[in-house]
Amino acid sequence: MNHRFITIALLAFFLLGYLSVLPFYEASRKAIKKEEVKGITLPPAIIKLFALEYRSIAADFLFVRLSQFYGGKVETIEKATKDDWQWLHRNLDLVTELDPYFQDPYFMANGFLTWDAGMYEEAEMLLQKAVKARTWDWTFPFFIGFNRFFFMGDNKGGADYLLMAYERPGAWNLLPSLAARLYYEDKKTETAISFLEKIWERESDVNIKKYYRVRLDALNKILFLEKAVDFYTEKIGLPPASLKALVDSKIIRGIPPDPYGGMFYIDKEGKVKSTSKLARKPK
Amino acid sequence: MRGILSLAYITFIEGIRSRALFGIFIMALLMFAVTVTLTNLFMRDIVKVAADLSLATISFSGLLMVIFIGNSLLSKDIDKRTIYMVISRPLSRTQYIWGKFAGIVMLVIAAVVFLGLISSLPVYFAGLTYENPEAIFKWTIYFSAIALIAMKLALIASVTIFFSSFTSTSFISLMLTIATYIIGASTETVKGFLDSRAGGVDISPLMGFVIKCVYYLFPNLATFDIKLQASHGLLLPEGYFIWALVYWFFYAGILVSAASLIMERREFP
């Protein structure tokens, strides 16, 4: 047998073998990847040590990994459990430890840890880092101000942060009047809409923009219903028992649908709420 | 002085001709090309990411160059016994060491200038793709960071020369240089842990003493790492650059003169 034949036969053997085991190999890789999708989060101190002089690039790559989480789980809200959110929070904390000036992770924290995860304090802890590091940037005290007011019911604290944001360069010139509204605890829905309009305007990511649009849509509908309730109360002298009363008395033509798929109703305190609690339903 | 300069020139030309240099440059160019694609994965801080990637590429490819090419330029002379040709000439061994060092520094400067200019392209284009009013980026700080990278590489070159002066094979000096780089890049962080007692870990007094010794003995390469400041356009403290230069001057000076002292006494088989 000549050598050339043996070499070609060997090459063919290895090539065929490689191609035939490829699917099995990939399946096993997938299995292990599923296990480590989240993986463990090393403490920031250790990562800082191992990253040597490549800390900020390590932050960039970790952030890309987090974006995949956002793409996979958050986009579909599939099964984002409490665990998932905590993992996201831990990793955002890590990224911002490696590079405390990095803007994107703070935006992610503000977008998801508040609205979807309900982890307001954790979100604020991260945003505080941004306020401290990015001393020239007004957006982060602005975000904290909004979260304090909208989620945590701390109007005074929210207003203080808005004024802090206003002192930074390039800030939105309506901040002082928003802060004033917060101090007087007035027109909560309208205030929230003005905030969100601004956040929506500044958002560059098309998906997140859509996400804020739906929220704005829902809040505008609530505002419409609130105004109808006020009108009813003024006309009849008594607050309506339900939203149906507004339709019956011909103040409104019908109850608008909740973009989140819930139903609007009036709670015991006379406030307009939705059964969806303005959170997206699993698809 | 003339002897040193002509030796430096020869070393520089020899380094430029090295094929490994082309490999390293091609890698760097590919990395810069990849930067443009990678920045698409980010939402706002695009210029920051582009600057991070560009500076890391310069630093890393420069490091490969100094460790592998710089090391071979000196150790190869000893390994392959071509050093006999040099020491039989009317040139002192001190002149030989300083000439080699100057040649490697010239090589570092040429490479960093080349990579620095090319790296600014992806950063510039990233700035055009998305306007971010809250991001600050200053070219002066970016180029200062590149200058500090060049200083760091020149310092590592002096480390290589120091180790080559007494080790018998180039492989050992290569390993020692890599170890020094890793220690030098992390020593400040370790000392930081010691000072802040991070993680509530108790550190024994002896360990603390060792860490402090290592901190002062090895070069603190974190001095030359202002990538974070460069990518966010943060101002450097006043006089930072001058003090980094002074630190570099004395540290590299100690290593190169120690190397020449060792070389003077060294006997070649």
Image (cartoon, rainbow, N blue to C red):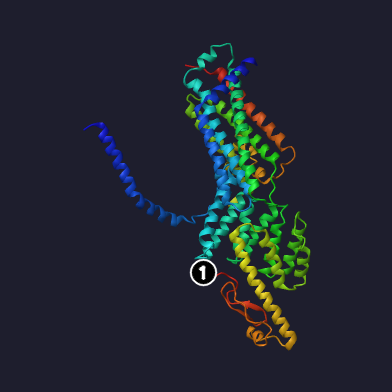
Residue beneath disc 1: A282
Q: Is residue B210 visible?
A: no
Percent position (x, y) of residue B82? 49, 17
**Residue A138 vertical placement versus B189 (above, below):** below
Give the tally of numbered discs: 1
Q: Nearer the viewer, residue A233 or B145?
A: A233
- Judged left or right of residue A227, residue B8 is left
Q: Nearer the viewer, residue A10 or B79?
A: A10
Percent position (x, y) of residue A281? 54, 70
Residue at 57% in and 57% down: A90
Q: Residue furthest left?
A: A1
**Which chain does the residue under circle 1 lie in?**
A
Locate residue B12: give its quadrant.
top right
Percent position (x, y) of residue B40? 57, 50
**Residue B178 vertical placement versus A45 (above, below):** above
Mark 1, secondary structure of its residue:
loop
Residue at 54% in and 14% down: B87
Q: Nearer the viewer, residue A17 or A37?
A: A17
Q: Nearer the viewer, residue A44 or B147?
A: B147
| Quadrant including the N terminus of chain A | top left
Percent position (x, y) of residue A2? 23, 31
Q: Amino acid at mark 1?
A: Pro
Q: Is residue B108 visible?
A: yes
